[in-house]
């Protein structure tokens, strides 16, 4: 143990000759240091959290304009490295903006120092996950973020919140046991923990690692723990979970798809399947928070369906979904049937409509550019499935867009500050891909949205169909994970056979 520690210290000391490396290590450590200081100076907790979020946003912007990726080797003999590039910058910026928005929403509440400290730990561990390109560092980051997320879910200390949190923790830890076994197999085959080692590892290593990441990321049937967890958590925690926490499991899948050629079609396949599964539930869901949670599952599929542009889509989705969960917490009811008979505050409706338009792919908001980029990056076999998922998205969010308007509601000031940041980010991010604004690119999403609205009024608005919740039940979730593992092994083995054949 001492030799490993000495090797790490010597390797880290040798690598920190570049100011950019020092800045990176300081950025990784900052949230955890701020979390510790917040207990010593509790009155400064909110300011420390805001400062950390701003530091992450600034670091992401520096990465975005950096001429080349930053690689930092911590333990070269074990392949323990950090890689910061354009892909990382999108995910880190998402983390910064969502954390800042949730903080602003909670600013005037009586949340304790403990709550903000856990936010800092979640923020820091997810930043670390977005920097890792080795499986052992990623394991540590995911476990730390999982424990902090568990504590945030259980924060109200009600019987319901504690049960939901324990359910989340049990499923998460079970999945990470599979992941850890896969990591050991990668090291056995390559003497390295690097993501790139998957190309030389046996197919069961990829299957075990990917099943852990699918569960952590809320992907396909392995992610059916997500709707209950996200819908039953407190409003700011739901925004944090759907906006950023699940992306800690999605990011490594995107990175592996880009680094390991054999994993790309597997990741893309799960992207399409996830997009369709989530939206299939969302279009029939009558509970607003559960609809948003199922749509989180679906939108994570869009990120995986086109890994090379997944970073931009992740940013857009994080901003939209956080805004929608914060808005859902201000609605007079979670039931769409009730909401259709209670006029909304005009200001709330405008914010709901902006977020819903963006996620549906309407021009002038970043969701449009993200959708266009994703659709242009699909393989031919993905096109039909992803177009159906886009149509389902338009149907789902018509439920918000066509709610009645009229009443006035007292809303906490923190909500408007959070929405200004999130919705303003959607407008600003629209500038990233102005080349998307061609006539053909504009007509297609508008036609999809129009068709979705028509189907909503003709079919889904008065539909009473409820899809079964069997696989969401706790006693079936582990079985579903096991089935996912079998499917993953079959897919990985097929790719491995092609490679050696």
Image (cartoon, grey):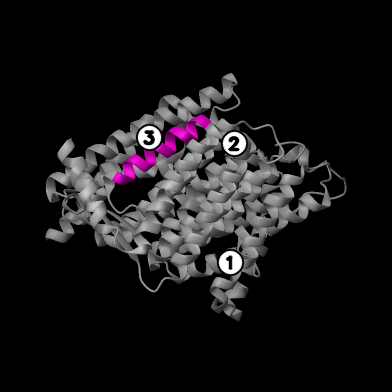
Looking at the picture, how far across and down is residue 263, in whole percent?
28, 56
**In which quadrant will I find the N terminus?**
top left
**Helix, strand or loop at mark 3:** helix
- Which secondary structure type mostly characterizes the magenta part of the structure? helix
Return the residue nearer the eye: 257 or 62. 62
User: Which residues make up the magenta segment?
Assistant: 137-151
Return the residue nearer the eye: 252 or 102. 102
Up the image or down, 276 lies above or below 336; here it is below
**Helix, strand or loop at mark 2:** helix
Tag shown at residue 429: 1
How far, Cα to Cα, is label 2 from label 1?
A: 27 Å
How far, Cα to Cα, is label 2 from label 3?
A: 21 Å
How far, Cα to Cα, is label 3 from label 1?
A: 37 Å
Looking at the picture, how far across and down is residue 21, in whole percent?
34, 60
| Lower sequence index among marks 2 and 3 | 2
Labels 2 & 1 near each other (Cβ < 8 A) = no
Query: What residue sits right under mark 2 in the picture?
Result: 231
Up the image or down, 26 lies above or below 289; here it is below
Query: What residue sits right under mark 3 in the picture?
Result: 480
Inspect the magenta stretch and tell me whether residue 197 lies in it.
Answer: no
**Helix, strand or loop at mark 1:** helix
Looking at the picture, how far across and down is residue 141, in whole percent?
37, 42
């Amino acid at each position: 143990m001492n030799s490993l520690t000495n090797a790490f210290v010597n390797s880290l000391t040798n690598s920190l000759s570049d100011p950019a490396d020092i800045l990176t290590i300081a950025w990784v450590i900052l949230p955890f240091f701020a979390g510790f200081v917040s207990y010593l100076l509790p009155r400064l907790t909110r300011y420390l959290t805001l400062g950390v979020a701003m530091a992450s946003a600034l670091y992401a912007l520096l990465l975005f304009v950096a001429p080349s990726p930053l690689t930092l080797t911590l333990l070269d003999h074990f392949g323990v490295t950090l890689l910061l590039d354009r892909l990382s910058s999108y995910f880190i910026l998402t983390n910064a903006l969502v954390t800042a928005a949730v903080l602003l929403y909670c600013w005037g509440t009586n949340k304790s120092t403990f709550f903000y400290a856990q936010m800092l730990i979640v923020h820091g561990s997810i930043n670390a996950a977005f920097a890792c390109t080795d499986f052992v560092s990623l394991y540590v980051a995911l476990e730390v973020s999982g424990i902090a997320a568990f504590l945030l879910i259980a924060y109200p200390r009600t019987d319901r919140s504690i049960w939901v949190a324990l359910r989340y923790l049990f499923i998460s830890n079970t999945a990470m046991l599979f992941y850890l076994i896969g990591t050991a197999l990668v090291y056995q085959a390559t003497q390295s923990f690097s993501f790139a080692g998957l190309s030389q590892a046996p197919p069961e290593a990829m299957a075990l690692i990917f099943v852990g990441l699918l569960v952590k990321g809320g992907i396909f049937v392995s992610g059916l723990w997500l709707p209950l967890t996200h819908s039953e958590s407190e409003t700011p925690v739901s925004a944090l979970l759907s906006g950023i926490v699940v992306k800690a499991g999605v990011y490594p899948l995107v990175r592996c798809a880009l680094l390991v050629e054999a994993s790309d079609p597997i990741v893309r396949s799960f992207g399409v399947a996830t997009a369709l599964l989530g939206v299939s539930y969302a279009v029939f869901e009558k509970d607003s928070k559960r609809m948003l949670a199922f749509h989180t599952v679906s939108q994570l599929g869009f990120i995986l369906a086109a890994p090379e542009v997944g970073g931009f889509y992740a940013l857009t989705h994080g901003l939209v979904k956080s805004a929608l969960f914060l808005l859902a917490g201000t609605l007079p009811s979670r039931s769409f049937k009730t909401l259709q008979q209670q006029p909304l505050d005009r200001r709330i409706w405008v914010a709901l409509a902006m977020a819903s338009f963006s996620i549906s792919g309407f021009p002038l908001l970043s969701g449009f550019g993200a959708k266009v980029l994703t659709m242009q990056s699909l393989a031919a076999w993905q096109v039909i499935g992803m177009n159906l998922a886009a149509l389902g998205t338009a149907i789902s969010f018509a439920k918000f867009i066509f709610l009645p308007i009229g009443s006035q509601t007292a809303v906490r000031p923190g909500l408007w500050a959070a929405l200004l940041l999130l919705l303003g980010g959607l407008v600003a991010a629209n500038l990233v891909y102005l080349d998307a604004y061609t006539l053909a690119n504009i007509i297609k999403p508008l036609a999809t949205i129009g068709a979705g609205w028509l189907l909503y009024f003709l079919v889904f608005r008065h539909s009473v169909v409820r899809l079964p919740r069997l696989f969401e039940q706790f006693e079936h979730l582990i079985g579903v994970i096991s089935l996912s593992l079998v499917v993953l092994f079959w897919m990985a083995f097929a790719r491995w056979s092609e490679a050696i054949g």
